[in-house]
Amino acid sequence: EKGGYEHFMLKEIHEQPNAILDTYRGRLLAKDGIIRMAGIDDNIEKFLNANRIIVVACGTSWHAGLVSEYIFEDLARIPVEVEYASEFRYRNPVITEKDVVIAISQSGETADTLAAIKLAKSKGAFVFGVCNVVGSSIARETNAGAYTHAGPEIGVASTKAFTTQITVLTLIALKLAKANGSMSNTEFHHHLQELELIPEKVKEALKADDHIKLVAQKYKDAKNCLYLGRGYNFPVALEGALKLKEISYIHAEGYPAAEMKHGPIALIDEQMPVFVIATKKGHYEKVVSNIQEIKSRSGKIIGIVTEGDEDVKNLADHVIEVPETIESLTPLLTTIPLQLLSYHIAVMLDKNVDQPRNLAKSVTVE
Ligand code: M6R
């Protein structure tokens, strides 16, 4: 059942090229320049007339929501708020009929997300679900939706659900960007072609596994770790830190790289591994200068970089390469090494990777 892998998590990490393919199969018609998604097509006016999109989710799904904020705003010029479902539901939030709420959930059973949906519906908002489990409570409770088609995710640490959620949200954003005119035909086609290349590039990224194992060996005894990224890759930093925390029980924090100087930089010394996402696309020079700041305080730097990178390589203690892609798709690649790294550290520390202590696969209580 684990398909020859030692753990479900590792199997699911390696399933990502196919899972992403399954997610856009039949939807992304790159040659024809079409994205077909019934849930969006049937409700396109709701999306085009919306004042804003409010994303509600928890945990890793919330991180996918944060990535989608960059995608929707950058590509489709639609304002987005991303909310922890648990905070949103109890805040007496301002919701109107002009809001579109997107609820993201792998299991489709998360209690807080379900309650946030019910609240939004009661205020007249249109609620769209992005779920993995077919026929789940959230899939049934939403007005419309799009499944991720990632296949069953058994490992408590979410992996392929995250990348397929980002894939679905990218498809939606591209569709809306085309429909509302914020993206030219040429750009639209370019994005579709780049998205089609992602499964192969994820495969490439997975090939760094042996090297990642060596990096894991070096840092497995750390007591604390920092994860930094900017722009599209800031949420990936949060997700990288969450993966490490939940399965290896090492304290880790994700931060926007530029926030470091507002506090966390005080933590940096020679004991502190800092994982920095520094791909060529997306504030590269700024991230490089953040890396210099860490280096001058003797922090250990592990860079997640674009293939062939030289600048970060010269500064960092280790680099892990991912293939090049357009900026909006980088999260689908930069996430991969961080998943593998957490996995290997947890295995080396002899932790229960698939069923970490205190955690459940679906959190059906608030
Ligand atoms: O099923 P959901 O996507 O609604 O679950 C949300 C979170 O409970 C979930 O992502 C959790 O954070 C994972 N354990 C993260 O790996």
Image (cartoon, grey):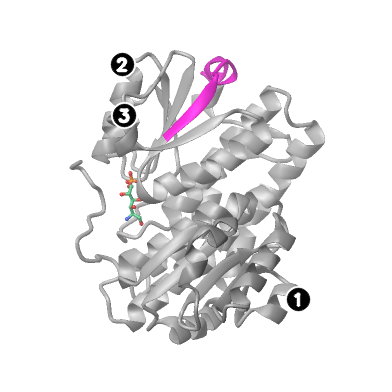
Q: Earlier in the sequence, mark 3 or mark 2?
A: 3
Q: Is residue 219 above or below residue 144?
A: below
Residue 255 percent location from the top left of the image: 50, 58
Residue 149 percent location from the top left of the image: 44, 45
Q: How far apart are labels 1 and 2 at the CA level?
A: 54 Å
Left or right, residue 285 beside residue 232: right
Q: Is residue 166 magenta?
A: no
Relative to the observer, which residue lies in front, 46 or 195? 46
Asked whether the viewer can see residue 325, the reply is yes
Q: How far apart are labels 3 and 2 at the CA level?
A: 15 Å
* Marks 3 and 2 close (CB-CB < 8 Å): no
Asked whether the viewer can see residue 135, the reply is no
Residue bearing mark 2? 122
Q: Is residue 105 above or below residue 288?
A: above
Mark 2 C-beta to ligand 1 under 8 Å:
no
Q: Earlier in the sequence, mark 3 or mark 1?
A: 3
Q: Is residue 210 above or below residue 278?
A: below
* Residue 36: quadrant of the picture: top right
Quadrant position of the C terminus in the picture: top left
Q: Amino acid at mark 2?
A: Ser
Residue bearing mark 1? 310
* Residue 96: quadrant of the picture: top left
Mark 1 C-beta to ligand 1 under 8 Å:
no
Q: Earlier in the sequence, mark 1 or mark 2?
A: 2
Q: Amino acid at mark 1?
A: Glu
